[in-house]
Amino acid sequence: MSKQQQMTREEWQNMAASLEIRNQAFINGQYVNAVSGATFDCESPVDGRILTQVASCDAEDADRAVAAARAAFESGVWRNLAPAKRKQILLKFAELIAANRDELALLETLDMGKPIRFSRSVDVGSTIRTLQWTAEAIDKVYDELAPTAINEIGMVTREPVGVVAAIVPWNFPLLMASWKFAPALAMGNSVILKPSEKSPLTAIRVAELAKQAGIPDGVFNVLPGFGHTVGKALALHMDVDTLVFTGSTGVAKQLMIYAGESNMKRVWLEAGGKSPNIVFADAPDLRRAAEEAAQAIAFNQGEVCTAGSRLLVEASIRDEFVALVTEALKDWQPGHPLDPATTCGAIVDQAQLKRVLSFIQLGQSEGASLVSGGQQVDQTSGGYYVEPTVFAGVNNQMSIAAEEIFGPVLSVISFETPEQAISIANDSIYGLAAAVWTSDINKAHKTAKALRAGSVWINHYDGGDMTAPFGGFKQSGNGRDKSLHAFDKYTEIKATWLKLD
């Protein structure tokens, strides 16, 4: 273990006390204030203190960033670089993120409330991996030649789409951003990144690392601010070619409307989820399944689009399995996010905490049985903490089973047959992810095929890496992040036909 991995809570707090926090927009290679001079408070959910005042961008700032991005794109300073050169620069970008790993992890924890152990290993670690993998793929993506007659040549080429606006969520601020900006940059586009106002700090910080790595001015821009101001301005902008988004389904629908009202920009959306985690009585290891079910709802405080928030359990093992999950959740009780032993941190802000608590009350009023948890804790800290919560006796018509809560609230639904389990699982407007636990390989494959979800995991939860695409069916969105399939979102396909004499 490195010294950094062994840092104590006190050492992390000392580091936080001396942290220099960037708080401006980054446009055309420079940190700048919002044109209006407006700022907003960046509050830490860890203890409620104000970390800094961040530039609050609006339409004028969007215009400046889009103009810089367009000028850089048209100049060819980035898109015309040889793929191997872009690869080299993005690999340097990954190296710089790795060199600043502890600072970025600390910013993520202070800003969003997640445990430092996961900020460092998962969020920053996976961001590095995203950039490295995507960079290495750049010069391994080939164009095509169509099968033509002897006197013709048909070329099929990928070209960068142009100016990409990426609006990213607050729950994995840097990682979700990297899933967008890595392939967009790899394909030669200019990028404008709009982080959530709830957690903008890592996006602002990595902008200067991008410049340090050699990404030209105007190619990578960051606009902090609110969705209804700068986010809307980017979505309606006539000179943004592609809009990519991760967030709620409601906002995703509105962005599609904005695209139609403006220039028909391409819109790629990763939206909500209410993922079913199906446990059959013949699961190979019920205790391990229960431990992963606990992690599936408590990791990142349940603020995960793929959270296993609907636990479908075969009726014959329901009581036994719920007891195992409840026991496993004892390892996921809220603690101080800067304590390396903490597994469950703070809810991102007071508004989200109120939403989670309101759903817990709603679950009880709708007739579900509260098995464990459900309380706000550690209120004297000034932060926002809630216990992981388990409801039994839930059906799909209840709000806690139908709506995405984005908190550590688990709904247990029992079933009698595989057909019933599939019917319950698919009875949702969402289709992001699902899991199946069984020792019967035929049942596993038949169930997986029947599930309407973009990712299905068998005998584990939340698997996959950069080699597999990520995205959803139905109102969970369109397009895919990760893997070579992500490149489709950031390129246009051109057919060029040559007639030979």
Image: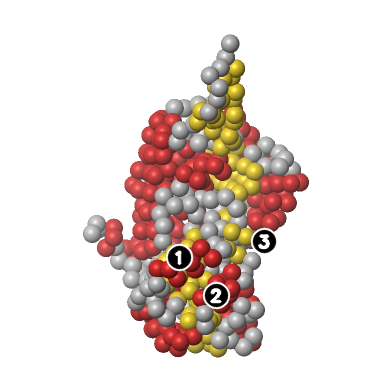
User: Whole-Å distance between the Cαs marked 2 and 1?
Assistant: 13 Å
| Sequence-first tag of 3 and 2 | 3
Mark 2 crowd level (few <14, some 14–19, many ≥20, 10 Å Cα)? few
Three-letter amino acid code at the position of disc 2: Glu
Depth order, front residue of 250/280: 280
Q: 475 left or right of 112?
A: right
Q: 110 left or right of 331?
A: right
**Quarter of the image holding residue 209?**
top left
Q: What residue does disc 2 label?
A: 419
| Sequence-first tag of 2 and 1 | 2
Residue 338 sits above or below residue 136 on the image: below
User: Whole-Å distance between the Cαs marked 3 and 2?
Assistant: 30 Å
The C terminus, quarter of image: top right
**Quarter of the image holding residue 153?**
top right
Q: What residue does disc 3 label?
A: 250
Q: Indicate the position of residue 294 as horizontal and vertical percent values.
A: 43, 75
Write the residue at 73% across / 51% down.
257
Q: Is mark 2 on a helix, strand or loop?
A: helix
Q: What residue does disc 1 label?
A: 445
Q: Indicate the position of residue 409 as horizontal and vertical percent values.
A: 52, 77
